[in-house]
Image: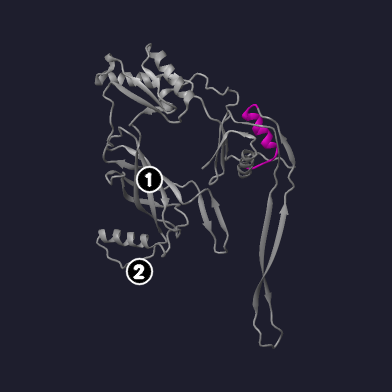
């Protein structure tokens, strides 16, 4: 079997040399945050213009109406039925506004096609207000859209596509106009919320905080929260900030759930360093079906009243790649797992199917996350 290397899309967390627990510890600010200080979700409706004929069609009534309304604001009145929208795409714009972000700060935004556009490549997002759940405007978004791929359709019907062309980002594309409301703890009792709830991590976090401050001020409430009692001398506004700064720098060893994360849109596969597999036999082969259409010109007989016609002739070819049966031994490290999968000569797309099959067979000792 011809050996193939895994494509660059296969991103591996090669931490197999480390044990399951993190050596040196992780700071509290990397695994937890204060309760009530999460980001504010923002959303908006906008238009991406400047597309090369890959925008929404005339079937997208909302896009045509939006373009007509936009032009009317600039003093230009065009009947909606006279508009074409193939260079414009209606999009939904989303962003996360971190707490304590001051007006004038720039944040990234994400855009996603709302109509039937073919691609957002080369487009520019027009000025779009971003609001929270109550409808309050917190930011204004505008800028060039980056999609990290392309989607090309030729006249002959061929289609070339890389990654996903209907979702993109505008780096630093939104300017914050209003600070999101946050409730800063004023002393007394506060809570740390774990980003990945886990009983073991919560217990270790409380133990590390108590050891750092030399007194029992932290208690693990459940798998997702650790309650803290701020010492009397640190409850003043100025001293509370210094206390929280010390708290963020406390190191602990979080417990991790082994995960394999796959993104079927881009073919990305990420394997955690503590992923293990039970012994299993895997055979993998590809089935390729090619359908080719060749135009055949049919000429009429001389002096007849017939006409020259073009008759399509279709040929179908089916190729089945021979799959070798290979035994995947019980892997002790990610490196062993990668070597075994490389022996199969698989691509990232093949890996997604293999990991799903290993999960169903009960041989994958990890959580399989599909994005």
The spot of residue 173 in percent (x, y) is: 36, 43
- For the point 38% across and 28% down, the residue is 33
Seen in the picture, residue 325 relative to 317 is either above or below; the reply is above
Question: Do tag 1 and tag 2 residues touch (Cβ < 8 Å)?
Answer: no
Seen in the picture, residue 293 relative to 124 is either above or below; the reply is below
Tag nearer the camera, 1 or 2: 1
Q: Quadrant of residue 66?
A: bottom left
Pick the residue in front: 175 or 213.
213
Element at label 2: helix
Pick the residue in front: 200 or 277.
200
- For the point 66% across and 41% down, the residue is 346
For label 1, the crowd category at 10 Å Cα-Cα, with few meaning under 14, some 14 to 19 and many 20 or more, is many
Residue range highlighted in magenta: 332-347
- Residue 291 shown in magenta: no
Q: Is residue 337 left or right of residue 116?
A: right
Seen in the picture, residue 185 relative to 323 is either above or below; the reply is above
- Tell me the chief SS of the magenta region: helix
Residue identifier under label 1: 94
- For the point 36% across and 66% down, the residue is 83
For label 2, the crowd category at 10 Å Cα-Cα, with few meaning under 14, some 14 to 19 and many 20 or more, is few
The spot of residue 52 in percent (x, y) is: 44, 58
Residue identifier under label 2: 81
């Amino acid at each position: 079997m011809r050996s193939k290397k895994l494509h660059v899309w296969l991103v591996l967390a090669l931490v197999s040399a480390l044990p399951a627990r993190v050596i040196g510890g992780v700071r509290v600010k990397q695994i937890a945050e204060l309760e009530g200080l999460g980001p504010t979700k923002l959303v908006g409706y906008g238009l991406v213009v400047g597309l090369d004929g890959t925008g929404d069609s005339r079937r997208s009534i909302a896009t045509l109406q939006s373009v007509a309304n936009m032009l009317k604001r600039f003093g230009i009145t065009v009947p909606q039925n006279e508009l074409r929208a193939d260079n414009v795409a209606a999009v939904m714009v989303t962003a996360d506004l971190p707490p304590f972000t001051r007006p004038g700060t720039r944040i990234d935004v994400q855009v996603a096609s709302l109509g039937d556009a073919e691609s957002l490549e080369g487009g520019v997002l027009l000025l779009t207000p971003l609001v929270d759940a109550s409808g309050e405007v917190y930011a204004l978004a505008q800028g060039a859209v980056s999609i990290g791929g392309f989607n090309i359709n030729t006249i002959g019907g061929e289609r070339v596509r890389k990654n996903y062309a209907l979702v993109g980002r505008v780096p630093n594309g939104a300017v914050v106009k209003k600070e999101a409301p946050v409730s800063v703890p004023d002393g007394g009792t506060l809570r740390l919320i774990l980003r990945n709830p886990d009983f073991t991590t919560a217990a270790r976090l409380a133990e590390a905080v108590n050891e750092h401050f030399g007194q029992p001020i932290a208690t693990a409430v459940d798998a997702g929260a650790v309650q803290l009692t701020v010492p009397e001398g640190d409850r003043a506004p100025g001293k509370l900030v210094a206390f929280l700064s010390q708290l963020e720098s406390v190191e602990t060893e979080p417990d991790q759930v082994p995960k394999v994360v796959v993104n079927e849109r881009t073919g990305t596969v990420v394997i955690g360093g503590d992923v293990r597999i039970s012994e299993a036999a895997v055979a993998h082969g590809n089935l390729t079906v090619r359908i080719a259409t060749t135009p055949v010109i049919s000429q009429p007989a001389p002096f007849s009243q017939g006409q020259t016609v073009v008759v399509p002739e279709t040929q179908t070819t089916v190729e089945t790649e021979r799959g070798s049966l290979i035994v995947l031994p019980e892997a002790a490290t990610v490196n062993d797992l990668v070597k075994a999968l490389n022996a199969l000569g698989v691509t990232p797309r093949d890996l997604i199917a293999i990991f799903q099959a290993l999960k169903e067979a009960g041989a994958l000792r990890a959580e399989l996350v599909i994005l």
